[in-house]
Amino acid sequence: MKAADLERTLRDDPGDLASWRLYGDRLRERGDARGTLIELQQRRDRTRPADREALDREIAAVVDEHQRSWDAALPEGATVLERRYGFATKVAVEWSDSAPVTIEQVMQAPFVTALRIAPSETQERDDYEWGDPSEAALPVPAPSIDTGALATLDLGRLVELDLSYLRIGAPGAEALAVSTYFRFEASGAGGFGPPAGSGRTEILDLRYCRVGDAGLAALAASQGFAGVRRLHLQRNLLSAEGLRALHPLAGLAELDLRYNEIGAEGVRALLAAPFIGSLKRLLLYRDDVGEAGAKMLADAPHLPPGLRSYWRNV
């Protein structure tokens, strides 16, 4: 197999050890020390813990010698958060006017499938200080967020997208959904159909993004996010309408809704969702749902027993 074909295979199945060995052979042929790193780390995994010390020293020596040059291939402003065999797999980029270009370059790296788009410290401070107090409860983007630029991002390869604390508002969420829609159309995967046409994203972190009901509805209706299994929605100005919008995400296994005043009506909408019986984690506070909502959760027959038991003891 060609290196490009192996990279595509390994993005889809990063646990495929045989393909990593083949890829390591290709890397060694062109003098890339990561080929040696793959061989050493796989050998270490097959070695008894008591015999790993020498291999650990070899691995550390290869990493110390080459990691700086490996990371030099990434654009300025990109920070590596996680690696596999020396390759960046999760990268962080601070949002700015130049961030879309940086993100586009990051997504050219062969194994980046997780991205954190973070606000700068200045953006976070301005977000808290900006605007009329009456606007604090509106799902509007921060002044520093160009929602049009969000629509240009190509994030179709991602398994994990973390936008936490980046206040994109409803327009930003809608821009991401529109971008995903057009990229699916261009690839021929769009339109109505089975989940096979869905994006790869499984983890979506929108904490404190203030997307509101309309923004969440746009994302939940997008094929690019149809496969999400872990969804973090703390403090997003959501109501029962937003909970009803979640129903297309049938594969949800983990849902965090803290700091949203969804009330009893929101609980009713949540309990009607097709994913309710398969949830493994549901994070909510009693203040989010009220006394009536808490009682409904405690008595809900379709809620998994462990979650139901929690609400009986809150």
Image: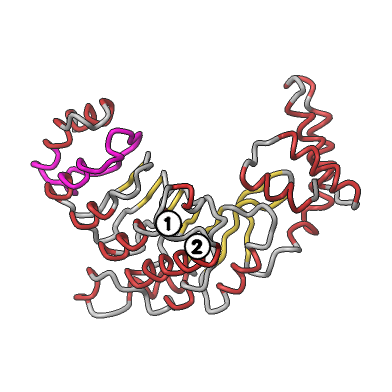
Q: Is residue 159 above or below residue 59?
A: below
- Front one among 139 and 158: 158
- Magenta part of the chain: 268-294
Up-down: is 163 above or below 270?
Answer: below
Circle 1: residue type: Gln
x and y percentages locating residue 205 in the rendered image? 42, 54
Q: Position of residue 301 (x, y in %)?
A: 18, 29
Task: Indicate whether 221 appears above or below 39.
Answer: below
- Residue lying at 37% horizontally and 56% vertically, measured from the top left: 207
Do callouts 2 and 1 mark residues in contact (Cβ within 8 Å)? yes
Task: Judge left or right: residue 113 versus residue 295.
Answer: right
Residue nearest the viewer, comparing 213 with 47: 213
Displayed quadrant of residue 55:
top right
Q: Relative to 15, say whether 100 is above or below.
A: below
Q: Amino acid at mark 2?
A: Phe
- Residue at the spot 75% in from the left edge and 19% down from the top edge: 48
Q: Quadrant of the C terminus?
A: top left
In the rendered view, does 137 fall on the left or right side of 14?
left
Where disc 1 sits, the SS reads helix
Q: Which residue is mark 2?
A: 184
**Alpha-carbon neighbours of circle 1 within 10 Å: few (<14), some, or many (≥20)?**
many
Find residue 238 and name its label: none
Q: Quadrant of the N terminus?
A: top right
User: Which percent across, then down, holds residue 300?
Assistant: 17, 32
Q: Which mark is residue 223?
A: 1
Taking the image as shown, residue 288 lies to the left or right of residue 90, namely left
Whether residue 284 is in magenta: the answer is: yes
